[in-house]
Amino acid sequence: MERLDKFISSQTNYSRKDIKDLVKKKQVLVNGEVVLKSDIKVDNLVDKIVVCGEEIIFKKYVYLMLNKPKGYVSASFDKNDKTVIDLVPDIYKHRNLFPAGRLDKDTTGLMIITDDGEFAHNILAPNKHISKTYNVTIDIDMNEDMVLGFKNGVNLSDGECKSASLEITGKNTGIVILTEGRYHQIKRMFGCFGAKVVELERIKMGNFTLPSDLKQGDVREFTKEELESVRS
């Protein structure tokens, strides 16, 4: 059980003062009854709570998928650049959201945004070896030396990369699958072959694939089934 105003403020953008004012205006109902005080106790798993005609559904955490466009940094706050959190709809702004993982400023594609630290740790921990799949376009022709080099593990300045998969899909395009996440890893790996990455899009994390109908810049919650696929 918890106070009504505390529960509503934890699930919405209403402040406790807002809620007190709404109670005075008879805009808050619990189980169909108009509430007279904002500090009454409620059970968020049992009681039906309605504010201004909208039912408030309890969510301990939220899990959002974003199709990241270029020009945004993977952070909750940045003094100089727009962040991926700036793309999140206002209805989630009261939560302490953060990106689970990162993409470079000029890289697009799938990102997971949440306020569940344990979940984020589980999908980011190096020992989990969760694979990440990318569409890549480079400035020269793809070749079999690159495929073999990725498979054997490219040697970078900070050590040798683990074996990665490169599938050539076009003259200068391919699909790369990584099981680790070094700084600018794909760009640096192709750099070992004299190539520059000109387009990079993450299309998959673990068992979850970026939905084809999620446009760049759009955000939506995971469905229960999608969330289970990421956790599996």
Image (cartoon, helix red, strand yellow):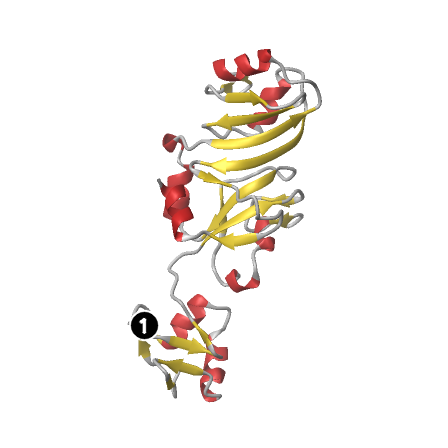
- Mark 1, residues whose alpha carbon is within 10 Å: few (<14), some, or many (≥20)? few
Is 84 placed left or right of 171 in the picture?
Answer: left
Looking at the rendered structure, the kind of residue marked 1 is Glu
Q: Is residue 43 above or below residue 169?
A: below
Image coordinates of residue 159 in percent, x first then y, are 50, 18
Residue depicted at x 55% and y 30% = 183
Give x and y (percent) for residue 194: 67, 16
| Quadrant location, the N terminus | bottom left
Q: How many marks?
A: 1
The residue to which callout 1 is attached is 2
Is residue 152 found left or right of 42 in the rendered image? right
Quadrant in which the C terminus appears: top left
Secondary structure at badge 1 equals strand
**In x, y percent, where is residue 55?**
43, 73
Snapshot quadrant of residue 32: bottom left
Q: Residue shown at 58%/46% (left/top)? A: 67
Q: Residue at x 49, y 30 (%)?
A: 181
Which residue is at the front of the view, 35 or 171? Answer: 171
| Front position in the image: 149 or 120 | 149
The residue at the point 37 percent across, 59 percent down is: 60
Q: Is residue 31 left or right of residue 160?
A: left
Residue 101 screen position, x and y as percent: 49, 40
Where is 85 relative to 203, above or below? Answer: below
